[in-house]
Amino acid sequence: MFKKLRNRFLLSNMLLTLAVFLVIFAVIYLSTYNTLRLENKEKLTLLPSSVQKNQETPVPAAGSVLIHTVDVYDGTQNLGNVTYFSVIVDSDGSVDQNQFARPGIEEAYKTMILTTWHDQKSGSLLTLGKTKWTYTFNLMEGSDKYQIFFMDITQSQKTLSDLAGTFILAGLITIAMVFLISLISANRAVKPVAEAWEKQQRFIADASHELKTPLAIIQANTDALLLKKEETIENQQKWIGYIQDEIARMSKLTGSLLLLAKTEDTQIQNKHADFDYSKCVSKAVLSLEAIIYEKKIELPQAIESGIHIISDADQVRQIVTILLDNAVKNTNEGGTIEVTLKKGKRNVEFTVKNSGSGIPAKDIPRLFDRFYRVDASRDSETGGFGLGLSIAKAMADRLNGQLTVQSVENVSTTFTFTIKKFS
């Protein structure tokens, strides 16, 4: 599916690039063509008068036809040098052989002259060997004869051919480069979509798995109740208790999922206000004193007092609570949890470091994924679903903060939440 998506993206990008390139080429080529056509037309129109007024220069090795060069003038402005030859024909199109350098006229020239006489469209393009010519008719004064002027436009045609060749070559190189760039861009563009799809599929599978177990337990205990219909509620309290436990577990799971969905909903606005961050952290630590005392955990604290920030107090409080709760769950009896809150020039940094087994390096990249648990057995014992850190990360991102983790396996794990003073 994603391969097809990438190919469609690549194809559309290539077609768009090709269309833009063709438009640019067409505009430049047609503009150049029109400019050269107008220049040649103007020179051809002025050629007869320029020949009469200016000195011409014969071109050697021109065969039996005398070819000349002459400067073309538009009034006093020199439009440039042109190469030409002229032929005088009678009113019936016959050619006087005496006007050529040597007896007899070359067949190619003869065909060229006959073509122009029958066509009689000044400005048309003719080919003579490897050269290109255009022509015009000029009625000779006091005579019924015509003088046909043939002007060499080989160079202007070569300019157009070179331009087309350059564009074709540039186009092939450009298309090849665009293809490579588009391929890289397509892969990069599709990658987040593929990852999001994979996470969604994994989320659905994990959520289904988490719900499947309590539902199975509820079903089993319901069946047990139905087998003993004559028993009183008091006598079947054990089965009812199991059902209540699983219902509570499912309620907790759905509550966490709703909270995560709410956190990731960009339509919901944060409630920013000034609040005492130091008191927020102190209260969160105080709420865990009982379990910390029970597990004989040492709790050194370095909480700067009087730190105020402008942010969403509820979300910040939840992040702090999740990180502290996570540290308590993953610290062995007799371990240590270090809590630090310090103020920088622009940011405030909250750090929770706990001793314990740490997190393997391979697990760190997925630590904030939904339902991901490094130690599934421990989470099942504590009633965790692997959503706490996902919620904390989503909230941190929503507040334009950063939540990072560092861990040394079998030594310690450190979570750091950094937020701007005015987020």
Image (cartoon, grey):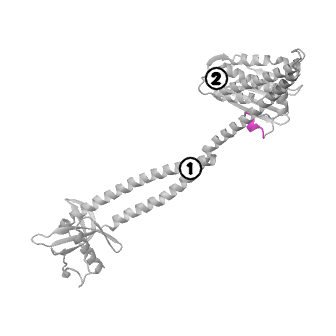
Number of marks present in the image shown: 2
Where is 33 relative to 320, above or below? below
Residue 14 is situated, as x and y percent measured from the top left of the image, at 52, 51
- For image coordinates 60% across by 43% down, the residue present is 189
As drawn, the residue found furthest toward the front would be 230
- Quarter of the figure that contains the C terminus: top right
Q: Is residue 328 left or right of residue 143?
A: right
Q: Residue 388: image x %, image y %?
A: 75, 27
Q: CA distance from mark 1 to mark 2?
A: 44 Å
Question: Which residue is tagged 1?
Answer: 10
Q: Is residue 395 left or right of residue 182?
A: right
Taking the spot 71% from the left edge, 35% from the top edge, the residue there is 204
Q: Is residue 366 magenta?
A: yes
Nearer to us in this view, 71 or 176: 176
Q: Position of residue 170 (x, y in %)?
A: 48, 58
The image quarter containing residue 422 is: top right
Quarter of the image where one finds residue 106:
bottom left
Q: Are the residues at dot 1 and dot 2 in contact (C-beta closer than 8 Å)?
A: no
Give the residue at mark 2. 421
